[in-house]
Image (cartoon, helix red, strand yellow):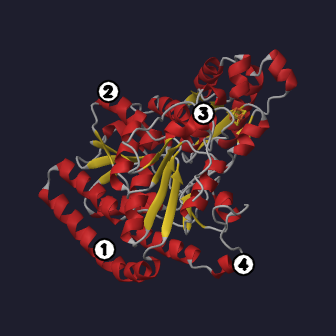
Amino acid sequence: MKAAAFLQDRKNQIHRKGKTPFTMECNKESLAGAVSQRACVFCGSRVVLYPIADALHLVHGPIGCAVYTWDIRGALSSGPELHRLSFSTDLQEMDVIFGGEKKLYNALVELIDRHQPKAAFVYSTCIVGIIGDDMGAVCKRVGDEKGIPVLPVMSEGFKGNKREGYQAACNAMSQLVGTGDTSGISRYSINILGDFNLAGEIWLIQDYLNRIGVEVVARITGDGRINDIKRAHGAALNVVQCSGATMELANMMKERFAIPSIRVSYFGIEDMAEALYEVARFFKDPLVMEKAKLLVREEIARIMPELNRYKAELKGKKAAIYVGGAFKAFSLVKAFRLIGMNVVMVGSQTGTAEDYEELQEITDEGTIIVDDSNPLELSSFLKEKDVDIFVGGVKERPIAYKLGVAFCDHNHERKEMLAGFQGMLNFAKEVYNSVMSPVWRFVPRRREGEKS
Ligand code: SF4
């Protein structure tokens, strides 16, 4: 079989389990010319802060940056929808020469007067980093004049990768935490960090938590509200899902307010159940644990008969995974195993050494593990492994379809809720429908050696 194609300088970021002892280079700048699937720093900040629905989000930069991230995710809101409007200062040549601070000031004042937001986030883009506008000073001036927090997000696109964007978003949010009233918050209370409510999952998780007697103080950031984030320091625990994106905020809250945090995942039966048990264990109350066990029993009993029907049909099929943060990949490997499928390739944009170590522990012999991949490599892995389905996000979808391979969106564009027990059932159903679709008779799968 022909080996998969990759640039020689990337070979240490690709590992085939079982061939050699495990070593993996990661967490470094993308290789020039490799056309990384990663987004820029600004985009990283935008995806984290975007779901805060009652805030104004103003992109200080050329219009293209705002368009690139406009309505980038589902990010459903149960109330206000100001986040879905994309505002930009639309910097032009003259602003680049003479500076964009005046334009930024005028835009902020006009937008705040018109929309009355609870706070405003102002995103810095590449060009703002180059011309050196003092965004902090403009934000402070407008904040003082309007009496709301106006927060600069220092996310110049070129200053790193998506990870630095997460950090910039956490820095901005940390200025809000600790400024609200915490009276009336239950002893059994948490903040949910790292779920962006793409398709309503945060409502399901909140419902589970309420059923076991735990109050959710702030949703950070899915269906997020400024006033909740301001009082998030009143919660007893931070429960962090997408650790790459929001762990930094949890660490800041631990330092400033002594709030401990746990890492969880809501994808798949095992991880969802463990997330509830972890929360229950934290509160050391047998009643909370009893309720968690009851909930897990009831939910599993409800979904298992249908899940087993999908498993019977999907047994032995092969899956490939490429996601933003590796933590989600762990859950997906387990979820595929639960429905009888084999994961033959798994990778992420921003995984750490520990993440990849864990991935190689939970995957089977021969699985390809890859860091910061690109379309050419991914196509070549899919063909070599002759996969039945590829799981990824918006940028991976065309790679799968061009090869005649089924695809499951586990990221920005999905409309189906995939978290929790119901989400596991939805996931199995979506995988089944995509793998078994008759469309593949008309778009036959391309294999190794065939042109794509
Ligand atoms: S790389 Fe720079 S110019 Fe491109 S979208 Fe990101 S911030 Fe804007």
Amino acid type, callout 3 = Val
Q: Quadrant of residue 271?
A: bottom left
Q: Residue at x 14, y 54 (%)?
A: 285
What is the secondary structure assignment of the residue under circle 1? helix
Q: Residue furthest right?
A: 94
Q: Quadrant of residue 400?
A: bottom right
What is the secondary structure assignment of the residue under circle 4? loop
Answer with left or right where residue 361 lies relative to residue 348. Answer: left
C-alpha span from label 2 to label 3:
25 Å
Amino acid type, callout 4 = Phe
Asked whether residue 220 is in view, the answer is no
**Residue 442 circle label:** 4
Residue 39, x across and y down, in percent: 62, 40
What is the secondary structure assignment of the residue under circle 2? helix
Question: Closer to the N terminus: mark 2 or mark 1?
Answer: 2
**Residue 300 circle label:** 1
Answer with left or right where residue 322 lies relative to residue 357. Answer: right
